[in-house]
Image (spheres, rainbow, N blue to C red):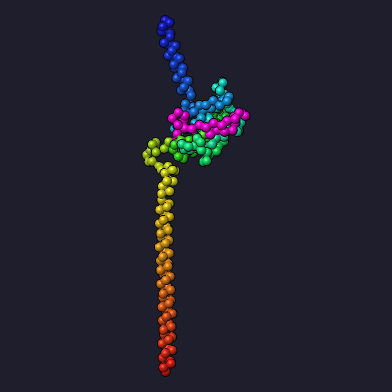
């Protein structure tokens, strides 16, 4: 009987572990980090994240000792969003946002779920730099997407159906290619028009000179005839 109980207990224990990991929910694809008295799970609010679609920086905050969600953090926590492989060290181009609760206890949402909404416009790596304070405790942490943290933003072309729409980046790249061509064509057209105007002006000048010369010739001829008479 005891030999049967042991395997059963092991199976129950394994099932409990699976339930624990399954219940992790949205945090399963986030980067987890202990910051002072708090445990932070940081990543995209909607995963997989697609370029061009509304998303958010999601920060799940819980007490590091009790694992209970923290439902009040003050209003001093901010996040700087940067994009690209060098974004972890380069903040020259960034989007600064306030981190705000995405819940109301007893009303809606998941307690401890804080967000900063934005639209990632380019596929690839993103870095979320949290600064400020949580209930007076200073925070200065960077979370960068990648294979060991949370997913990068993906190109939506792979899931578009039935027609694939060009992304904002593709449209910008096409504009970058077409605008110089249009400018060159416009400049050439203006140059041709200018040359045509110059030619027409020269023709008018030549015609006027011809008329003047003709008038002078006629006047000279008339003067000669009168002198002979």
What residue is at 41 percent from the left and 75 percent from the top? 207
Q: Does the magenta stretch include residue 134?
A: yes
Q: Quadrant of the C terminus?
A: bottom left
Examine the residues drawn in magenta and state their main secondary structure: strand
Q: Does the magenta stretch include residue 162?
A: no
Query: Residue placed farthest to the right in the image?
Result: 136
- The one nearer the camera, 113 or 30, is 30
What residue is at 62 percent from the left and 29 percent from the top? 136
218 is higher (above) or lower (below) than 185:
below
- The one nearer the camera, 24 or 80, is 80
Q: Is residue 107 rendered to the left or right of residue 170? A: right
What residue is at 50 percent from the left and 26 percent from the top? 32
Q: Residue 171's image quarter?
A: top left
Q: Is residue 69 visible?
A: no
Q: Can residue 40 be seen in this view?
A: yes
21 is higher (above) or lower (below) than 213:
above
Q: Where residue 122 sits: x, y (%)?
A: 45, 39
Query: Residue placed farthest to the top in the image?
Result: 1
Query: Residue placed farthest to the bottom in the image?
Result: 229
Q: Where residue 45 sits: x, y (%)?
A: 49, 32
What residue is at 41 percent from the left and 60 percent from the top? 189
Q: How many labels does the image show?
A: 0
Q: In which quarter of the image is the N terminus?
A: top left
Query: Residue placed farthest to the left in the image?
Result: 162
- The one nearer the camera, 125 or 77, is 125
Q: Residue 77's image quarter?
A: top right
Point out the stretch of residues depicted in magenta: 129-153
Q: Where residue 183 sits: x, y (%)?
A: 43, 55
Q: Where residue 203 sits: x, y (%)?
A: 40, 72
């Amino acid at each position: 009987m005891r030999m049967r109980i042991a395997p059963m207990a092991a199976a129950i224990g394994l099932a409990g572990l699976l339930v624990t990991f399954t219940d992790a929910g949205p945090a399963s694809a986030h980067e987890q980090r202990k910051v002072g008295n708090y445990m932070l799970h940081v990543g995209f609010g909607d995963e997989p994240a697609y370029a061009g679609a509304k998303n958010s920086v999601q920060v799940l905050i819980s007490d590091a000792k009790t694992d209970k969600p923290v439902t009040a953090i003050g209003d001093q926590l901010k996040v700087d969003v940067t994009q690209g492989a060098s974004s972890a060290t380069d903040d020259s181009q960034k989007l600064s946002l306030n981190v705000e609760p995405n819940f109301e206890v007893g009303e809606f949402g998941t307690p401890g779920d804080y967000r900063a909404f934005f639209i990632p416009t380019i596929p690839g790596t993103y870095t979320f730099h949290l600064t400020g304070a949580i209930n007076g405790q200073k925070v200065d942490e960077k979370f960068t997407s990648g294979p060991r943290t949370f997913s990068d933003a993906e190109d939506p072309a792979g899931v578009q159906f039935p027609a694939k729409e060009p992304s904002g980046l593709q449209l910008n790249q096409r504009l970058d290619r077409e605008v110089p061509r249009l400018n060159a064509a416009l400049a050439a057209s203006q140059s041709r028009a200018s040359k045509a105007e110059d030619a027409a002006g020269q023709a008018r000048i030549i015609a006027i000179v011809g008329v003047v010369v003709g008038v002078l010739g006629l006047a000279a001829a008339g003067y000669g005839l009168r002198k002979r008479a």
